[in-house]
Image (tube, helix red, strand yellow):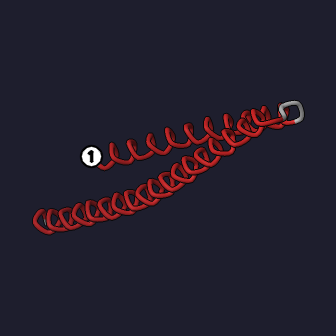
Amino acid sequence: MQQSEVRATKNGIQALEMAYSGIFKIRQDVQNTRFNLAAGYKGSDGGAFQDLISSWEDQADVILRNLEEMVDKLNQTLTKQHQQQGSSNESINQGFQEARAVFDTLHG
């Protein structure tokens, strides 16, 4: 069960990182388009366009920050899952050694 939780957490991290990369690339494309059009796009419609793009970039920044925070939290969860799994393995090994010692004593 722990392995499937670890796998699910890793899949979540990968999906969030892919979303982040996609949004970041689109944000760069929008910035490039903005700069290319800025020189020739003047007047009130140009100002409205700049405002629209600025608003969109602000929202994209919020989404990117949220994705970063989610990845950080999932990485923390992954660390805890690995610690828990290591602790479980130690307990299993200790139980095995104790059982072997009892068997060896009984077997003589």
Q: Which quadrant of the structure image shows residue 31? A: top right
Q: Which quadrant of the structure image shows residue 99? A: bottom left
Compared with 89, 45 (above or below) is above
Residue drawn at 71 percent across, 38 percent down: 48
In the image, is 56 to the left or to the right of 28?
Answer: left
- Give the camera-side residue of 47 and 56: 47
Residue drawn at 56 percent across, 37 percent down: 18
Residue positioned most to the front: 44
In the image, is 90 to the left or to the right of 37?
Answer: left
Residue drawn at 14 percent across, 69 percent down: 105
- Give the camera-side residue of 25 and 40: 40
Compared with 5, 39 (above or below) is above
Q: Which residue is mark 1?
A: 1
- Residue 103, given in percent of the width and then of the height, sits at 14, 62
* Amino acid on which the number 1 mark rests in the picture: Met
User: In the rendered picture of this protein, how many numbered marks are placed on residues?
Assistant: 1
- Give the camera-side residue of 83 and 23: 23
- Residue 39, given in percent of the width and then of the height, sits at 89, 35
- Residue 35, given in percent of the width and then of the height, sits at 83, 37
Q: Residues within 10 Å of mark 1 (few under 14, many from 20)?
A: few
Residue positioned most to the right: 39
Quadrant including the C terminus: bottom left
Callout 1: SS: loop
Residue drawn at 38 percent across, 48 percent down: 6
In the image, is 84 to the left or to the right of 25?
Answer: left
- Residue 69, given in percent of the width and then of the height, sits at 51, 56
